[in-house]
């Protein structure tokens, strides 16, 4: 069994080196139940994928990647030349030849389109940079473009989460343009992928970028969307951006909570000199000292009373201030409710504005088509009658026919024995339209026997 495995391993490395993708497939199919693909390495610490990249065998690289050989597997330290390098890094080192790099990018795009998060994550670990990696000319779509148009929501989050701590790189990734000047948000809006649009808007994608060609020519992302849900998401995003901007001088910043301050009244202190002494003494000096002590104690009591009155006054003012603060809070809550209603109204108005712009663009396109048709009609040559068509017209004889003249004289000269009577309206119709046949004129049955006066 071990000999068979060794022979299969050796065959894989030889097929990878010579680019025999068919042999690789056959060996992998034959040993699919026993081969441990991630552990297959040669004596130099290389995997078959490393070997195929080193020898630039594109078909073998595609087959090995599809078979599950890990692209992020590094060369073991036993090989000093390629030590620690992944297969993709080996491909990058082959610059200016980019054949192997394009193979890896094509495989990455396939995994993104299928929303295979684990495979994409392994390719990113292998060294693929989402900011700079593209599918190449002529489209120059980034990995995020492909994830957005494929509605690969998990991959979109994976790419954006990669730069959670680097806002600059995340912004560059989200606002990167392809050859038509469109961003990933353009692609998501154009395909009406709501979840992708939500993720990009929440991460701060630029909503004002205008494409310069393709389906989004001269349009922002919201202008290429046809979903009202996407329109609402972007309208809310614009409102959030406006709210996140620093406040102007006119705006008043109020604190959310203001804790009431408790005023502690100082306790009335006892007299510094103790209780009044009622000792009777006839010594004048002692009497003077007692009176002085009494005066000092009275002064202290008065000072304490004044302080207490002042503190009580302050406490009353404090109650007024707290009542005023409560009223301010109530007004603040009312204003916040009004602001919330105003925001909803603004979002609705933004949606209506976007719809109106779409209608205006549609009408403008109709007007342009009509103008082009008018211009084409003006430039078209006027068809003139040819001589042949004139020649084909029946010739009118200038010489009168004797028989026809005789017949005409006989008809006109014969007196009418039963003259036809016409009504006023029939005569008026015959006067206005003399070419009509008198036989077809309407006659008034009441005046049919009236004679006709001729002049």
Image (cartoon, rainbow, N blue to C red):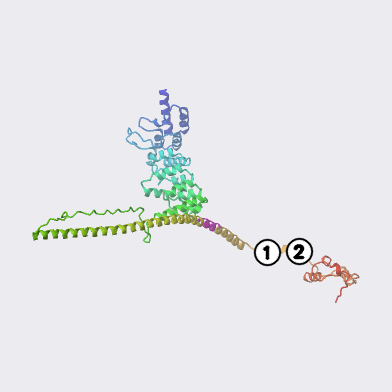
Picture residue at 39% right of the left edge, 30% below the top:
39
Sequence-wise, the earlier of marks 1 and 2 is 1
Residue lying at the far right in this picture: please name it: 417
Picture residue at 23% right of the left edge, 58% below the top:
305
- Residue extent of the magenta highlight: 354-362
Picture residue at 40% right of the left edge, 50% below the top:
171
According to the picture, the residue beneath numbered tag 2 turns out to be 393
Is residue 215 rendered to the left or right of residue 450?
A: left
Which image quarter is the N terminus in? top left
In the rendered image, the vertical position of residue 385 relative to residue 44, given as above or below: below
* Badge 2: residue crowd in 10 Å (few <14, some 14–19, many ≥20): few
Please, what secondary structure does the residue beneath circle 1 have? Answer: loop
According to the picture, the residue beneath numbered tag 1 turns out to be 384
In the rendered image, the vertical position of residue 86 relative to residue 196, given as above or below: above
* Badge 1: residue crowd in 10 Å (few <14, some 14–19, many ≥20): few
Q: Is residue 253 visible?
A: no
Please, what secondary structure does the residue beneath circle 2 have? Answer: loop
Residue lying at the far top in this picture: please name it: 1
Q: Is residue 159 visible?
A: yes
Name the dominant secondary structure of the magenta segment: helix
Q: Nearer the viewer, residue 49 or 350?
A: 350
Q: Nearer the viewer, residue 327 or 412?
A: 327
């Amino acid at each position: 069994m071990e000999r068979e495995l060794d022979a299969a391993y050796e065959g894989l490395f030889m097929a990878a080196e010579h680019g025999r993708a068919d042999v690789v497939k056959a060996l992998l199919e034959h040993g699919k139940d026993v081969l441990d693909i991630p552990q297959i390495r040669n004596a130099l610490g290389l995997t078959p994928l490393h070997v195929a990249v080193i020898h630039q065998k594109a078909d073998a690289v595609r087959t090995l990647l599809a078979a599950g050989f890990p692209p992020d597997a590094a060369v073991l330290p036993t090989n000093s030349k390629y030590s620690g390098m992944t297969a993709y890094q080996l491909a990058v080192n082959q610059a200016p030849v980019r054949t192997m790099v394009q193979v890896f990018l094509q495989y990455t795009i396939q995994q993104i389109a299928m929303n295979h998060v684990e495979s994409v994550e392994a390719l990113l670990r292998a060294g693929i940079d989402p900011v700079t990696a593209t599918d190449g000319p002529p489209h120059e779509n980034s990995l995020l473009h492909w994830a957005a148009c494929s509605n690969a929501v998990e991959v979109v989050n994976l790419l954006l989460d990669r730069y959670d701590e680097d806002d600059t790189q995340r912004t560059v990734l989200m606002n990167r343009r392809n050859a038509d000047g469109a961003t990933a948000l353009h692609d998501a809006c154009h395909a009406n992928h709501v979840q992708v649009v939500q993720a990009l808007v929440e991460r701060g994608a630029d909503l004002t970028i205008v494409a310069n060609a393709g389906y989004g020519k001269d349009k922002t992302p919201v202008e290429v969307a046809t979903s009202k849900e996407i329109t609402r998401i972007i309208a809310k995003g614009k409102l959030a951006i406006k709210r996140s901007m620093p406040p102007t001088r006119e705006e008043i910043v109020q604190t959310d909570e203001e804790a009431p301050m408790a005023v502690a009244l100082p306790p009335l202190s006892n007299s510094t000199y103790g209780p009044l002494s009622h000792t009777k003494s006839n010594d004048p000096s002692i009497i003077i000292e007692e009176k002085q002590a009494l005066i000092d104690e009275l002064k202290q009591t008065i000072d304490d009373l004044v302080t207490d009155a002042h503190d009580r006054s302050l406490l009353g003012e404090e109650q007024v201030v707290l009542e005023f603060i409560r009223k301010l809070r109530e007004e603040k809550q009312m204003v916040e409710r009004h602001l919330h209603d105003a925001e909803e109204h603004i979002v609705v108005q933004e949606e209506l504005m976007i719809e109106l712009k779409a209608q205006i663009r549609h009408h403008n396109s109709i007007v342009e088509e009509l103008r082009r048709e008018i211009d084409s009609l003006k430039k078209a040559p006027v068809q003139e009658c040819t001589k042949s068509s004139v020649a084909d017209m029946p010739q009118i004889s200038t010489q009168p026919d004797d028989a026809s003249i005789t017949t005409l004289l006989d008809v006109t000269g014969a007196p009418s024995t039963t003259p036809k009577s016409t009504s006023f309206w029939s005569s008026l119709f015959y006067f206005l339209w003399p070419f009509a046949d008198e036989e077809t004129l309407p006659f008034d049955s009441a005046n049919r026997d009236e004679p006709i006066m001729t002049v």
